[in-house]
Image: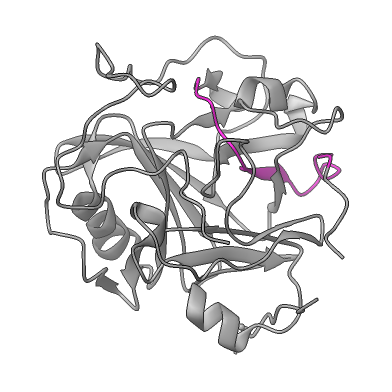
């Protein structure tokens, strides 16, 4: 088993959640594969008990409404979740929320490409157990737009790295990790296959880590192009590497604001409050 290296100084399957590559026209589909009749609905919030201040805020960028959530190492922990106590995928944020105390959670988002079984098709580490190896294969869809990347970390140190860089430089297995693609930003520049403002638009989410170590999670509240989302990370958040997490099924649970997005999802990135105990999440037995 290859052990993976936090160097901080840090087969082939087509994901069911993949979109058309950047620059191609986007066709909205239902989860059964048929054409969607209506555009995706925007987020909704309901009255919530007093769970303290929200880690998320509403912003606008180039006329597109976004929700920007910050995970601060001084205040938060990050973990992955995919399977419930029944060893079946949660499949939705609502089902995951029913398994934890909402008071311990800052927010949670879907994060990482997955197959028809809702399990990760790329590198995936949960609670220190590697359940899926790094996927360096070629294929179709946004996951295979090289370079793709890995969001990972241990304790309060988190990074986004390109998959090849991760493979070549990381030796110790992190506490959590999820692979997705493409990288929206590569060393501060837009991914070479991403247009400045291509015609493909969807509800999308991504993650990037700034120079201070804070992780910035952004989900669009209206359809957005790959290029617009990448520029928000480059021009506003000033991160070097930003990783696209998913599109169309992109979902956010923000307990403090009563927001619970609906969507059939795979791996979940869970940001919990550091003063609370880490959110419990079941996992499969590790690969041997």
Q: Which residues are magenta?
A: 261-282
Q: Is residue 195 above or below residue 224?
A: below
Whether 79 is among the magenta residues is: no
Q: Position of residue 66 (x, y in %)?
A: 32, 37
Q: Main secondary structure of the magenta part?
A: loop
Foreground of the two, 198 or 256: 198
Q: Residue at x 32, y 59 (%)?
A: 233
Q: Is residue 10 above or below residue 227?
A: below
26 relative position to 218: left or right: left
131 relative position to 249: left or right: right
The quadrant of the rendering that contains the N terminus is bottom right
The quadrant holding residue 49 is top right
267 relative position to 70: left or right: right
The quadrant holding residue 91 is top right
Q: Position of residue 140 (x, y in %)?
A: 34, 55
Q: Position of residue 179 (x, y in %)?
A: 55, 60
Q: Residue at x 55, y 66 (%)?
A: 135
Q: Residue at x 71, y 84 (%)?
A: 171
Foreground of the two, 110 or 100: 110
């Amino acid at each position: 088993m290859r052990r993976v290296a936090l160097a901080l100084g840090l087969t082939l399957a087509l994901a069911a959640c993949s979109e058309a590559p950047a620059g191609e026209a986007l066709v909205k589909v239902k989860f059964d594969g048929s054409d969607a009749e209506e555009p995706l609905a925007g987020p909704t919030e309901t009255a919530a008990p007093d769970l303290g201040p929200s880690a998320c805020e509403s912003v606008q960028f180039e006329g597109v409404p976004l929700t920007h959530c910050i995970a601060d190492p001084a205040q938060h922990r990050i973990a992955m979740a995919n399977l419930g106590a029944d060893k079946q995928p949660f499949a939705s944020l609502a089902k995951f929320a029913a398994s934890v105390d909402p008071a311990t959670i800052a927010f949670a988002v879907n994060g990482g490409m997955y197959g028809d079984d809702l399990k990760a098709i790329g590198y995936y580490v949960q609670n220190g157990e590697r359940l899926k190896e790094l996927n360096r294969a070629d294929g179709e869809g946004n996951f295979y737009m090289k370079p793709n990347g890995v969001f990972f970390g241990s304790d309060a140190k988190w990074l986004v790295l390109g998959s090849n860089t991760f493979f070549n430089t990381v030796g110790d297995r992190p506490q959590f990790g999820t692979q997705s693609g493409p990288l929206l930003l590569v060393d501060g520049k837009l991914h070479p296959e991403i247009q400045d403002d291509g015609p493909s638009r969807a509800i999308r989410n991504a993650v990037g880590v700034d120079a201070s170590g804070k992780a910035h999670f952004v989900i669009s509240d209206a359809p957005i192009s790959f290029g617009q989302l990448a520029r928000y990370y480059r021009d506003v958040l000033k991160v070097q590497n930003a990783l696209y997490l998913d599109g169309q099924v992109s979902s956010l649970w923000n307990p403090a604001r009563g927001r619970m997005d609906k969507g059939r999802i795979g791996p979940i990135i869970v940001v919990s409050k550091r003063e609370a105990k880490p959110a419990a999440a079941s996992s499969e037995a590790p690969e041997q």
